Image: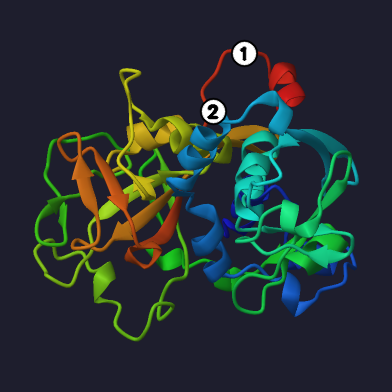
Amino acid sequence: MSQLSLVASAMSSILDIPVKTYDECIANGYTISPEQILDLNFIHNNSLMYVRNEVNEVEDTFLTFTTSNLIQIFVINLSGDSQAIFVDPHNTVLELKYIIQDKLEYDIKLIRLEFANRRLEDHRTLRSYNIQQGDNVHISLRLLGGNFNMDSCAIKNYCIITEDFLDPKYDYNFTNLKDDEEKYYRGKRVLYRRPYGWERIALNVSRKYGHDDRWLGCVGNSPYEWPVSYHGTKKECFNAIAGEGYRLDKGKRFSYGKGIYSTPIIEIAEGYAKVFKHNGTLYKAVFQNRVNPVGFDEHKGGKYWVTPNEKDIRPYGLCVKKVQTIIPQFFYDLIL
């Protein structure tokens, strides 16, 4: 049975825009545009949250400002609603984007800013555009990756996912399996901690990164294989990571610098998992990735990996599991 509908629900939650299956669109007579079809490049570029030091630099800069330096501007979101934000005219557009990401939970990779019908460039200051007290800055979505166009999706209010997005022959259901203490390895004998208790839905990554797919091998000691890690899908958690460092299992606070943060332990990634609803049931979702063994740094005894180069981490599966809770369903209906 195809898992496409379940993946569509997960991606709707992760991307914050409705994702419909191709068959659903056909059945309901929806218009289908090639620009609306979700591709793996977009998922790779915009679902793996990249922690940047610039966030801390923005916050540190604000500590030096006095109230007299600040002006109030209004950011108009995609729905036309406005949010008052205090900024210094000497802030760059990129710094403003990070403030918007923190307050409004937009991924800065997905947005562009406009003022007076003019697109704003990241390196320039607000003052250089003559942005003053009370002015409106508008958020819009930008084109990213392949033929997929987020602007087109926003206009039509949905994206489309096709069967080609998945690779069912590599699905594996770990839901009812338990750790039998057998050791598994991927890539130069790096320990592979299998996602027990989760169902792994395989993404179609064949030939997506060139013609050599040996990075996906499962021999365990091959120099061409890449080890396995997990990455949470809850964007609001990454604002905290970027500003305060990775919050670890015992509540400690520290940061390991710029890069994509992941972990070889799915129980840790679960703390950053997005909860979504599908057919009345709540699920959690995390990405399963392969990571270039020479392209990441290990921390805390190997529990936490930081990949500075986005090309050195590749999502190849979506792990999902049902949420076990005794909280009444109507309460979750209110918060989802």
Relative to the observer, which residue lies in front, 196 or 317? Answer: 317
- The local crowd at label 2, few if under 14, some if 14 to 19, many if 20 or more residues have their Cα within 10 Å, is few
Q: Which residue is mark 1?
A: 327
Q: Residue at x 20, y 64 (%)?
A: 218
Q: Earlier in the sequence, mark 1 or mark 2?
A: 2
Q: Residue at x 8, y 64 (%)?
A: 221
Q: Which residue is mark 2?
A: 63
Relative to the observer, which residue lies in front, 149 or 133? Answer: 133
Q: Residue at x 62, y 13 (%)?
A: 327
Q: Amino acid at mark 1?
A: Ile
Q: Quadrant of the C terminus?
A: top right
In the image, residue 106 lies at what x, y percent?
67, 46
Relative to the observer, which residue lies in front, 96 or 4? Answer: 96
In the image, residue 197 lies at what x, y percent?
37, 36
**Kind of element beneath mark 1:** loop
Q: Amino acid at mark 2?
A: Leu
